[in-house]
Image (spheres, rainbow, N blue to C red):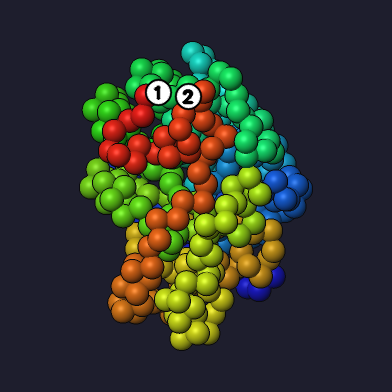
């Protein structure tokens, strides 16, 4: 591994509390292609190089392995716990009363931590599917979004903050109509919104809404998730690294187009959480944010490449009677309830 990065060179983003967190994190979703050992070893190498934000989730089935490498890092004094910003998420089958606490405690035990920095509601409904299931898989118990059900889950997340088990709580895979329905009801507001963000799917309206409410956008699939599961692929998908403005900037800066996507994300204002188990890639993913920024013209050119190309459509969460994956995302500006 090349010499670890200087922390002072890494840009930061600011939470509503004024706390600063790194502008790039490392994702840990292996897209059904990588096992827990490979992913945890990537986390080990990434932290040794200089990553300080780690995005985890119970459903990724690797938090216990990541916990082992975190312990190793602490024992080797590579990093102290307080230097890391670690997130996790409650999965859809654990929304019921009392289950959010159980889920959080399980993640803490697996990660071998006393607290989490940020805990997300992974999806805004209890619709469950088994890890690795096919794209046409349906759970007969799935149902549309409910404000009451969501708020019951959110209240449990607020209790996690009260108990000192998590420092911040966040939402994920939300829409503006859903946010407008629940934000006024929150005792503890979300610190972050995890959402799909990449040059061909910029979600500008939702991005602006989050920023206006002091909710930090955290972007998954920041380079278009080329290793995403087959169930999430369709013939209409756009490859972000092949967009003309991205390719032109890559040529001008003499870097891989994936790094242009990450530079764009950081300069735009979101926190990308790219995933890679390959050392040269996760090193360059962080390093690119510290050097050779995109020009204003390049940023504008990439902004013009938005294709409204959602890659993670969520079709496995559909309920009986739903017309299609579009019903999950309230495309007409109203929450779809049936």
- Dot 2: within a 10 Å radius of its alpha carbon, few (fewer than 14), some, or many (20 or more) residues? few
Q: Residue at x 62, y 39 (%)?
A: 135
- Which residue: 40% across, 61% down? 307
Relative to 96, say whether 211 is above or below. below
Which residue: 40% across, 23% down? 338
- Disc 1/disc 2 C-alpha distance (Å): 7 Å
Q: Is residue 282 visible?
A: yes
Name the spot of residue 42 as percent of width and height, x first: 68, 56
Place of residue 151 in the rendered image (x, y in percent of width and height, measured from the top left): 37, 21
Check the image and report above or below for 274 versus 4: above
Q: Is residue 257 above or below residue 153?
A: below
Residue 235 position by quadrant:
bottom right
Give 60 or 10, whichever is nearer the viewer: 60
Q: Is residue 100 above or below residue 283?
A: above
In the image, which disc is placed on residue 321?
A: 2
Q: Residue furthest top?
A: 97
Residue 206 locus on image (x, y percent):
31, 47
User: Marks 2 and 1: in contact by CB < 8 Å?
Assistant: yes
Answer left or right for 198 relative to 179.
Answer: right
Q: Which residue is mark 1?
A: 338
Q: In which quadrant of the rendered image does the N terminus lie?
A: bottom right
* Residue 121 seen in the current view: no
| Quarter of the view holding residue 303 | bottom left
């Amino acid at each position: 591994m090349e010499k670890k990065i200087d922390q002072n060179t890494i840009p930061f983003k600011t939470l509503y509390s004024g706390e600063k967190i790194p502008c790039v994190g490392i994702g840990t979703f292996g897209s059904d292609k990588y096992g827990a050992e490979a992913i945890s070893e990537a986390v080990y190498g990434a932290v040794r190089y200089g990553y300080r934000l780690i995005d985890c989730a119970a459903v990724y089935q690797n938090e216990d392995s990541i916990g082992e490498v975190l312990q190793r890092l602490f024992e080797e004094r590579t990093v102290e716990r307080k230097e890391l910003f670690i997130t996790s998420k409650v999965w859809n089958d654990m929304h019921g009363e009392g289950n959010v606490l159980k889920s959080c405690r399980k993640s803490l035990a697996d990660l071998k931590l006393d607290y989490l920095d940020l805990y997300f509601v992974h999806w805004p409904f209890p619709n469950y599917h088994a890890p690795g299931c096919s794209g046409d898989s349906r759970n007969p118990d799935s149902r549309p979004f409910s404000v009451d059900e969501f708020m019951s889950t959110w209240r449990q997340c607020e209790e996690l903050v009260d108990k000192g088990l998590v420092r911040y709580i966040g939402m994920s895979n939300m829409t503006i109509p859903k946010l407008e329905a629940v934000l006024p009801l929150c005792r503890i507001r979300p610190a972050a919104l995890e959402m799909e963000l990449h040059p061909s799917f910029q979600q500008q309206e939702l991005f602006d809404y989050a920023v206006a409410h002091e909710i930090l956008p955290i972007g998954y699939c920041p380079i278009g998730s080329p290793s995403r599961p087959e169930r999430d692929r369709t013939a209409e998908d756009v490859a972000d690294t092949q967009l003309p403005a991205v390719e032109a900037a890559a040529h001008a800066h003499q870097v891989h187009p994936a790094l242009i996507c990450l530079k764009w994300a950081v300069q735009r204002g979101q926190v990308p959480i790219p995933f890679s188990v390959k050392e040269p890639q996760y090193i360059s993913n962080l390093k690119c944010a510290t050097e050779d920024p995109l020009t204003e013209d390049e940023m504008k050119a990439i902004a013009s490449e938005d294709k409204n190309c959602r890659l993670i459509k969520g079709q496995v969460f559909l309920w009986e009677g739903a017309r299609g994956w579009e019903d999950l995302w309230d495309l007409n500006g109203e929450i779809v309830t049936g």
